[in-house]
Image (tube, grey):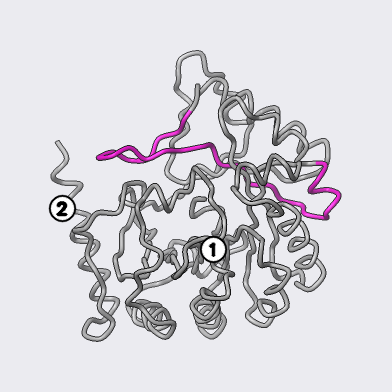
């Protein structure tokens, strides 16, 4: 799941153009699902090794906001609503609430019924729940856990009940090549639940030594997205394609540009303004987020380093990498 899925849509005008801080929160026992296409697993991001405390996440934001504008705080992770992850998640949400910075959460929804009432006190701007099929059997098979679908749907219903209009609730799905049919029933399901927004991301992979790439034939991807959008429109569901770093191209051979532009494809306008902080203090930015996590990534030590100073080091390191590319 990319940063755009987590990014609140209704950002205040004063925050536009600022840094987007995304956080992977610790999961000492790993995720409670086993998705074969997990982006965090592909990036080799550690879940159980954390040197950052809940209060350190707050310090990270407070240090940075003294030096530059911050548009949003996006919480992702293996699963930020696990009992062992909640202390970290709530620290970030409270920081956003106190500093008036929009916050958002991406979750698999399995613990959402349990945690929804707690989350309402922290006023997240956006809650995005992952559902990868309209039928329980298909979703559970893809996610590696029986009952995951029913838990996520129950969590969505509970969220719609307890959250106010200030929190946007959306569903995010992964489009797998040659498996569009498992998503065809999603608009009807979402309309039945009461969710008005559907975000679709194409299946992507990260190969060793390279950045993330979209899997599948680009023409077929376009046709699949067009069909999904038409279906969503018929149910009055807002349809969005999450392509934060521009992996989908309109200049592919035989690709109909008008059809491409008719699909709402969102990209990050300031790719270098996105930062990703891991529980072990490692931080990446920009296109480096689409690569595997490397041992040489700069690490923030909250005990002896101001986070704003650290971020400048990350920017300098990133700029040197770009200059070194022939």
Residue 141: % across, % down: 64, 42
Q: How many marks?
A: 2
Q: Judging from the image, what secondary structure is the residue with disc 1 in?
A: loop
Please provide the residue range marked out in magenta.
Answer: 188-215
Q: Residues within 10 Å of mark 1 (few under 14, many from 20)?
A: many
Question: Is residue 184 a member of the stretch shown in magenta?
Answer: no
Residue 222: % across, % down: 58, 26
In the image, taking residue 109 as reference, residue 260 lies left or right, namely left
In the image, taking residue 58 as reference, residue 133 lies left or right, namely right
Q: Residues within 10 Å of mark 2 (few under 14, many from 20)?
A: few
Residue 288: % across, % down: 30, 50
Q: Which mark is residue 196?
A: none
Q: Quadrant of the C terminus?
A: top left
Residue picked out by circle 2 = 320
Q: Nearer the viewer, residue 73 or 115?
A: 115
> Along the polypeptide, which appears first: circle 1 or circle 2?
1
Residue at (44% x, 70% y) in the render: 28
Closest to the camera, between mark 1 and mark 2, is: 1
Q: Nearer the viewer, residue 315 or 220?
A: 220
Q: Is residue 244 above or below residue 48?
A: above
Residue 62: % across, % down: 39, 82
Q: Residue furthest right?
A: 192
Q: Which mark is residue 79?
A: 1
Residue at (46% x, 49% y) in the render: 268
- When asked about the image quadrant of residue 281, the answer is bottom left
Residue at (13% x, 44% y) in the render: 324
In the image, taking residue 280 as reference, residue 168 lies left or right, namely right
Question: Is residue 200 a member of the stretch shown in magenta?
Answer: yes
Q: What distance separates the C-alpha of mark 1 from that of mark 2? A: 33 Å
């Amino acid at each position: 799941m990319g940063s755009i899925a987590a990014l609140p849509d209704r950002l205040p005008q004063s925050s536009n153009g600022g840094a987007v801080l995304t956080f992977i929160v610790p999961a000492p026992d790993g995720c409670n699902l086993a998705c074969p296409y997990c982006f965090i697993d592909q990036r080799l991001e550690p879940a159980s090794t954390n040197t950052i405390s809940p209060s350190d996440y707050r310090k990270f934001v407070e240090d940075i906001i003294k030096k530059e504008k911050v548009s949003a705080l996006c919480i992702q992770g293996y699963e930020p609503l696990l009992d062992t992850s909640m202390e970290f998640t709530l620290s970030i949400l409270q920081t956003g609430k106190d500093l008036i910075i929009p916050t958002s959460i991406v979750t698999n929804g399995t613990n959402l019924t349990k945690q929804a009432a707690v989350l309402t006190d922290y006023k997240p701007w956006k809650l995005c729940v992952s559902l990868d099929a309209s039928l329980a059997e298909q979703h559970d098979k893809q996610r590696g856990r029986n009952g995951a679908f029913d838990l996520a749907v129950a969590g969505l219903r509970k969220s719609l009940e307890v959250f106010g209009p200030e929190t946007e609730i959306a569903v995010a799905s992964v489009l797998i090549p040659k498996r569009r049919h498992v998503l065809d029933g999603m608009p009807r399901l979402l309309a039945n639940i009461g969710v008005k927004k559907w975000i679709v991301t194409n299946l992507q992979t990260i190969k060793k030594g390279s950045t993330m790439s979209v899997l599948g034939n680009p023409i077929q991807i376009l046709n699949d997205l067009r069909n999904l959008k038409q279906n969503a429109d018929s149910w009055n569901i807002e349809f969005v394609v999450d392509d934060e770093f521009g992996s989908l191209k309109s200049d592919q051979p035989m690709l109909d540009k008008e059809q491409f532009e008719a699909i709402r494809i969102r990209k990050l306008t300031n790719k270098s303004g996105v930062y990703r902080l891991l529980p072990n203090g490692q931080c990446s930015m920009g296109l480096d987020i689409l690569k595997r996590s490397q041992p040489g990534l700069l690490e923030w030590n909250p005990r002896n380093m101001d986070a704003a100073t650290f971020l400048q080091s990350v920017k300098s390191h990133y700029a040197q990498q770009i200059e070194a590319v022939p």
